[in-house]
Amino acid sequence: MSRLTTLETELFRTLNSLIEPAVRAGYGFPGIASTGLIVLETQGRRTGIPYRTPIPATLIGDYLLIATILGERSQWIKNARMAPDVRYWLCGRVRGARALVFTPDDSPPDIQGLPPLARCIASIVDATASGLGVAFAILRPALSLERDA
């Protein structure tokens, strides 16, 4: 691992540890605006340990659009690709979802089951993000995954 990658990892780890408790408690996602912060919980692809990451999200009906400029270097992208059943905290409440992960180097997931607006946004963002090296996911609600924090 290069020195720059190590510094980047430590920076995000420190920021996440400061922000995550407040976002889980319900701060950071305004009620009127459709964009704010959530805490995304993924399972470690090698360890199975749950990892929580504060991340910007945009509501599209009952679905969420989340992205990272780190592209495929992002740990949550790697984890969600391997184990797409995730949890997230929105407005202080934990919810279950299935992550549809879009990365520049992989074929996009099947979006036919998404509502028309989410499908349209996924297509537009995928075309734009791929050219920029950005990775993103759409979180599809999964009621069967909901459980208490």
Image (tube, rainbow, N blue to C red):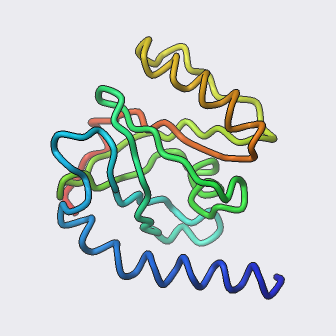
Q: Nearer the viewer, residue 83 or 4?
A: 4
Please give the name of the residue rendered at 83% of the width and 83% of the height, measured from the top-left corner.
2
Quarter of the rendering containing residue 53: bottom left
Figure check: 76 above or below 8: above
Identified at 54% across, 48% down, the residue is: 67
Residue 115: x and y, percent?
A: 41, 15
Q: Determine the residue located farthest toward the front in the rendered image.
A: 33
Measuring 24% from the left and 54% from the top, which residue is drawn there? 94
Q: Is residue 112 left or right of residue 85?
A: right
Q: Quadrant of residue 21?
A: bottom left
Residue 80 locus on image (x, y percent):
56, 51
Q: How many marks?
A: 0
Residue 84, percent across and down?
Answer: 53, 45
5 displayed left or right of 90: right
Q: Nearer the viewer, residue 91 or 31?
A: 31
Q: Residue at x 18, y 60 (%)?
A: 26
Return the x and y of residue 5 as percentages of the image width and height.
75, 78
In the rendered image, the vertical position of residue 139 relative to residue 114, given as above or below: below
| Image quadrant in which the C terminus is located | bottom left
Image quarter (top left, top right, bottom left or bottom right) of the N terminus: bottom right
